[in-house]
Structures are given as structure tokens and as C-alpha cells.
């Protein structure tokens, strides 16, 4: 049983205050959806949770199974079981998926077979895994590749940053149902950042959180996502006097 | 002056002594380079004191270097120690000649450059390797250029004459014991009509050795020179590569991987000279710098008036693993014909933050992430290395270099 606890998290870049008191707990087997308008700081939250350089945490804590993550490097957080599936997975010429699996301490020793099996499950069997990671892949293939790594590296809590962008309907179904299965079979905990409720049809959220201007303004059940799809964020944004532009990360 | 005495002591016919004397006087006219000259810009050559090193006037006694992994790479080899031919394998597919045994004057065509002239004057044992017309070597010919004497000044000198239609792979290895010395090697290559030469240079000299090297290649009609260099050693290691596409339809490809650590300075100057029509050159040089290492790359594409239909490309990329590194990259074009396609690109940049972050999110420690990124960075050149028989060894040398081990 794992537990990611974000408590009163405030963070900023040199110029701007980005997170303004985030409170959220994600446990093993749970799916939390984080939805919010462009520029509300959702991706930035994902990066800060993962320890990306360039942000300063000014207040609050992030713990994973009672271990304080705030002073740890990205790879150390990953080794504790936190995973970030990127919105824009980078292409790295000359570094293959097998290199990643070989060098990551999270990969099981006999990963070859399970990677091949997952590749088939995720519709990546036609891809040459000895090529540079993500290189010349379509947006959808990149997202399948992220899912392949998430599953193969046996992460405990996964942050999915717009995993649905770039995926077609079939891809979306394959990827979301595979992750849904991991929450059931392997007790994976998920924080899914998305704009659309379609991803949540297969990957069923226990909670939906609305994120505006660096904090969660409302949390509710799965139906909240449907409501959002129909009515947008106006109900929440109009109550704020000014909307702060946060750079779209 | 010691040079005169030295010349007298070298073996060879009268004509050779005369060539040496002339070269000394030309060197005196040209004079020792200063940092102000364009081709020596950014170079620490002005700190060099020739008199601190002694020319090797007696052929070194060499034991069999069987422990050296490079020996096992091929059964075709030529071994030079401190610029003297010490052994070579006999073959019907090539001839190894010592110029000091040649009665008819040999035309060296050394350029009017201080160190080229010094090399011509003071190389104790210039060697010519002739590959006959239409020869086809099964295995690469490995040239071992070893430095074995401490505080020595050495002048290895090689001429490779590739006969028309020949298909050959040649590997030239610059290697030294753990010593302090200065080496001024010159390798001249003529690639005959329709010949195809794959040439791999491996510079793996000691960290206290200074090298001022020259590689001068002339490619004739419809011939191909596919050359690469890998540079990991040297305190200050400079390699000037001149690729002259003389014949119509000639092709010259140049690629390099160099990796500097500690206080190393790696200096590459390249000339892609298009003299013939419909000639093509592709250059890709990639450098990796760590600690306080420095690198210099300056490249010139020169297209003669007659060279219509030229395609010439030049790319130099340098990755900096530490903030204390320093790199200069200067591409130049000199084009006298309108019917050409040329491009040049150069970048000097730190490790990409997005790539680093991405790999770290997969649970890979920072130190290993950088190694992976370097592996990825040089991969494009690794794919182009011409003599595949030695690729595994090259990758091992590069990995050891990155891991900080003495190769």
C-alpha cells in the first residue's frame, strides 16, 4: 500500500507564484483526475512532484509513504515508485528503450519478455525497440511508449500528464484500459491530468478535482468530469476576480 | 644547429638529404606560428618550446606488443615506433617502402607550413605504403603509430598511395606509453581513380603528450574517401585534416568523435576543398567535453571556380557536460562557383534538460543519465564509422574514457 500526500503545497518560479496551497492524497489502487483550464498549473504540479529543477517550494510538503520527497532528486523519487508519463515525451537519438530498462533499477531482471508482451498489448509490436526512444514516433505511439514504461518499471504511483493528447480513440482505449487493469491487479495509484472525460471512460476515477490558478477549488465524484465537459470552467473561473496567466506548462 | 647534424645522421640517398635541408630552410622562412594567425587562433601553440624535447636519433628497440588489444584486430599491420618502421606484415596486396631506400627522388609535396616542413626535414624514416591497382584487402591494414620515448620529439611520416579501383580499409592508431612527449605526425593519402578507401584514425595518446598532426587527402576521379577520427588522448592534440576532391565525381566524407576531460585541449581544423566538378563532401564532427576540457573546431569549405555541381555539408556539434568546459566552433565557406549546394551548422550546448529529466523520471541516476545522453549524442557518428571491424574496440575506448579509466 502506497500513499502520495501533498499538503498545502506552495511553489514558485523566480517570477511567478504557481502553486498556491495544493492538498491531495493518492493511494494505491485509486484514480484521481485533475482537470482545469489551460495555464492553471496542472503540468507544473506534475513536474514539481517529480522534482524538476527551476521551481522553489516555499511552503508545504510532498511525501510518498512517509518519505519526504522535497529534497530528493528526480531519479530518487522515481526509484521510490513515483512515475511521470510526460505530456511531450522527448526524442533521444541513440538511447533505446532497452538502454532505459537496462539502466533503471526499477526494471525487473528478466524484463525482456514482459516488455515484449506489453508491447504487443499496447500495439507497439511493429516498432523497432532498438531505435532511439520516441524517435520519429507519432504522438499516439509516444503515449503508448510512456504506458509501456509505466507498466514495465512497476511504478506504484503514476502521474499521467495529458496521456490522452495525441492518442486516437483506439489508442486511448488500449492505454486507459491497461492502466485501469494495473490499478486493479498491481494496486497502481494514479493521478491523471486531462482535459477530456473520454480518458476517464475506461480509467475510472474515484475522485475528480478541479484545478484553477494553482490550487484545487473543488473535488467530487466521477460525474463532475461529465459536468465539466458540458459546462466548462466558467462556474469556477468567473468567481475569481482576475485570472493569472501561468505560462501554459 | 642540431637539425643539420641530425639530417646528416639519417640514412638515405643524397637527394633525400637535399630535400631535408631545403625543408629546414623553408621552415625557417615560414617561422614558428604565433597565436595571431587565423589557423592557429585559440591554440596554445605559442606555449610550446621545441627545445624541451629531443628528437629520437636511434631506432628504438621494441619488444613485441602482444598485450595490446589493437594488435589482434587484423593480420595486416605496419608498426612505427617514434617514427621508425619497426615491423610490418608482408602481403601481396600492399607494399611497404622506406623512402631512405629509394634511389629515385620521391615527391613529398609537403605544404608550406612550419610543422609540415619540420616533419619533412626531420622524419627519420618516411614510409610509403602502396596499394596496387584494383587490390581488394579482406582485412583492414592497421598502422600502429606508437610513441615510446619520454621527452622525445617525433616525426612519423606516412604516404598512402591507393591504386585506382582498389577497395581498402586502413586504421591508423596513434598510441603512446605513459610519457611526456611531442609528436608531429603527417599522413598523406592519394586515393586513385574509382578507388574506395575507408580510413579510421584512433588517437589514443597519453594525457601528457602534445600532438600536432596533419592528415592530407587527395581524392581522384569517382573515388571515395570515407574517413573518421576518434580522439580521446593528448594534453594538447591537434589534427588538421585537408580533404581535396580533385577528380570529377570524387567524394570525401569526414567524421569525428572526440572526448576531452581534465585539462585536455582538443583542436580540429578541417578543409573540404572542392576542385573537381560534381564532387561531394559530408562532414560531421561531434565533441564531448567534461571537467575543464577545451575544444576548438574550425572548418572551411572551399569551392573552386571550376567545381560546378558541388555538394558540401559541414556540421560540428559539441556537448558540454560541465560548466567549466570551453568550446569554440567556427565554420567558414569560400565559394567561387554558383552551381553548388553547401550548408554548415555548428552548436555548442550543455546536456538537454528535457532529455535529462525524462531519463531521470525512469529511475536512472543522474550520473548514468549523462552517460546515456552522451552515448545518444555520438550515436549518429558511430553509425557512420567506416571500418566496422574496429567499432567495438572504439566503443570500448570511448566507454572507458567516459568512466575515467585509462584506456
Image (cartoon, helix red, strand yellow):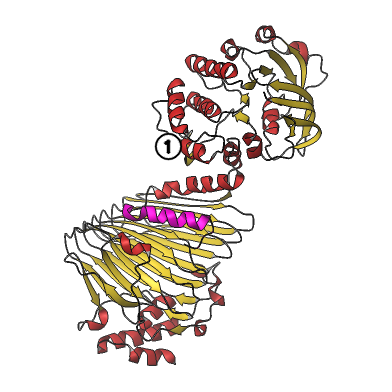
Residue B404 highlighted magenta (yes or no): yes
Q: Is residue B292 above or below residue A50?
A: below
Q: Position of residue A19 (x, y in %)?
A: 77, 28
- Viewer-proximal residue, B398 or A89? B398
Q: Position of residue B340 (x, y in %)?
A: 36, 50
Q: Secondary structure at mark 1?
A: loop
In the image, taking residue B97 as reference, residue B37 lies left or right, namely: right
**Residue sitting at x 50%, y 14%:** A169
Asked whether the viewer can see residue B113, the reply is no
**Residue sitting at x 58%, y 63%:** B262
In the image, taking residue B315 as reference, residue B78 lies left or right, namely: left
Q: Position of residue A50 (x, y in %)?
A: 67, 33
Q: Which residues are magenta?
A: B387-407
In the image, taking residue B320 as reference, residue B216 lies left or right, namely: left
Asked whether the viewer can see residue B374, the reply is yes
Residue wearing tag 1: A131
Q: Could you tell me which chain the residue with mark 1 belongs to?
A: A
Residue B264 sits in which quadrant?
A: bottom right
Q: Position of residue A103 (x, y in %)?
A: 53, 41
**Residue sitting at x 64%, y 21%:** A190
Magenta stretch secondary structure, dominant? helix
**Residue sitting at x 45%, y 59%:** B299
Amino acid at each position: 500500500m502506497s500513499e502520495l500526500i501533498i499538503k498545502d503545497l506552495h511553489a514558485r518560479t523566480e517570477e511567478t507564484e504557481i502553486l498556491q496551497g495544493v492538498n491531495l492524497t493518492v493511494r494505491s489502487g485509486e484514480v484521481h483526475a485533475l482537470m482545469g483550464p489551460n495555464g492553471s498549473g496542472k503540468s507544473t504540479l506534475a513536474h514539481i512532484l517529480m522534482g524538476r529543477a527551476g521551481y522553489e517550494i516555499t511552503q508545504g510538503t510532498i511525501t510518498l509513504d512517509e518519505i519526504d520527497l522535497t529534497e530528493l532528486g528526480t531519479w530518487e523519487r522515481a526509484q521510490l515508485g513515483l512515475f511521470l508519463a510526460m505530456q511531450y515525451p522527448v526524442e533521444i537519438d541513440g538511447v533505446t528503450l532497452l538502454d532505459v530498462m537496462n539502466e533503471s533499477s526499477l526494471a525487473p531482471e528478466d524484463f525482456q519478455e514482459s516488455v515484449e508482451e506489453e508491447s504487443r498489448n499496447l500495439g507497439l509490436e511493429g516498432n523497432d525497440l532498438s531505435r532511439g526512444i520516441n524517435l520519429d514516433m507519432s504522438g499516439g505511439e509516444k503515449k503508448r511508449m510512456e504506458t509501456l514504461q509505466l507498466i514495465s518499471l512497476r511504478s506504484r504511483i503514476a502521474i499521467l500528464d495529458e496521456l490522452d493528447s495525441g492518442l486516437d480513440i483506439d489508442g486511448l482505449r488500449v492505454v486507459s484500459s491497461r492502466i485501469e487493469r494495473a490499478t486493479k491487479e498491481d494496486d497502481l495509484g494514479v493521478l491523471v491530468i486531462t482535459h477530456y472525460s473520454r480518458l476517464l471512460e475506461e480509467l475510472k476515477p474515484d475522485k475528480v478535482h478541479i484545478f484553477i490558478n494553482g490550487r484545487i477549488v473543488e473535488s467530487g465524484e466521477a460525474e463532475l468530469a461529465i459536468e465539466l465537459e458540458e459546462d466548462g470552467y466558467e462556474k469556477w473561473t468567473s468567481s475569481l476576480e482576475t485570472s493569472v496567466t501561468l505560462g501554459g506548462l | 644547429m642540431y637539425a643539420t647534424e641530425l639530417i646528416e645522421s639519417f640514412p638515405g640517398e643524397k637527394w633525400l638529404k637535399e630535400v631535408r635541408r631545403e625543408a629546414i630552410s623553408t621552415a625557417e622562412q615560414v617561422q614558428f606560428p604565433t597565436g595571431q594567425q587565423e589557423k592557429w587562433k585559440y591554440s596554445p601553440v605559442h606555449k610550446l618550446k621545441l627545445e624541451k624535447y629531443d628528437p629520437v636519433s636511434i631506432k628504438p628497440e621494441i619488444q613485441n606488443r602482444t598485450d595490446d588489444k589493437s594488435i589482434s584486430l587484423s593480420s595486416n599491420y605496419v608498426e612505427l615506433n617514434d617514427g621508425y618502421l619497426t615491423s610490418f606484415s608482408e602481403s601481396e596486396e600492399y607494399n611497404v617502402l622506406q623512402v631512405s631506400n629509394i634511389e629515385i627522388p620521391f615527391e613529398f609535396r609537403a605544404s608550406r607550413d612550419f610543422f609540415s616542413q619540420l616533419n619533412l626535414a626531420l622524419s627519420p624514416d618516411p614510409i610509403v605504403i602502396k596499394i596496387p591497382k584494383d587490390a581488394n584487402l579482406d582485412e583492414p591494414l592497421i598502422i600502429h603509430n606508437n610513441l615510446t620515448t619520454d621527452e622525445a620529439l617525433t616525426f612519423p611520416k606516412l604516404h598512402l598511395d591507393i591504386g585506382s579501383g582498389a577497395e581498402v580499409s586502413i586504421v591508423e592508431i596513434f598510441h603512446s606509453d605513459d610519457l611526456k612527449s611531442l609528436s608531429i605526425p603527417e599522413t598523406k593519402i592519394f586515393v586513385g581513380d574509382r578507388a574506395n578507401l575507408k580510413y579510421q584514425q584512433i588517437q589514443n595518446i597519453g594525457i601528457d603528450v602534445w600532438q600536432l598532426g596533419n592528415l592530407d587527402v587527395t581524392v581522384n576521379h569517382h573515388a571515395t574517401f570515407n574517413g573518421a577520427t576518434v580522439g580521446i588522448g593528448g594534453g594538447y592534440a591537434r589534427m588538421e585534416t585537408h580533404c581535396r576532391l580533385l577528380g570529377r565525381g570524387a567524394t570525401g566524407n569526414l567524421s569525428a568523435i572526440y572526448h576531452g576531460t581534465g585539462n585536455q585541449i582538443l583542436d580540429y581544423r578541417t578543409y573540404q576543398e572542392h576542385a573537381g566538378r560534381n564532387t561531394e563532401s559530408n562532414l560531421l564532427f561531434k565533441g564531448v567535453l567534461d571537467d575543464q576540457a577545451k575544444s576548438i573546431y574550425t572548418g572551411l569549405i572551399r569551392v573552386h571556380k571550376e567545381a560546378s555541381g558541388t555538394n558540401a555539408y559541414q556540421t560540428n556539434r559539441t556537448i558540454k557536460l560541465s560548466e567549466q568546459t570551453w568550446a569554440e566552433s567556427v565554420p567558414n565557406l569560400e565559394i567561387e562557383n554558383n552551381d553548388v549546394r553547401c550548408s554548415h551548422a555548428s552548436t555548442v550546448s550543455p546536456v538537454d534538460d528535457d532529455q535529462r529529466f525524462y531519463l531521470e523520471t525512469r529511475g536512472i541516476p543522474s550520473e548514468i543519465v549523462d552517460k546515456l545522453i552522451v552515448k545518444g549524442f555520438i550515436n549518429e557518428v558511430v553509425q557512420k564509422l567506416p571500418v566496422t571491424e574496429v567499432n567495438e574496440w572504439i566503443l570500448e575506448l570511448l566507454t572507458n574514457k567516459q568512466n575515467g579509466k585509462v584506456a
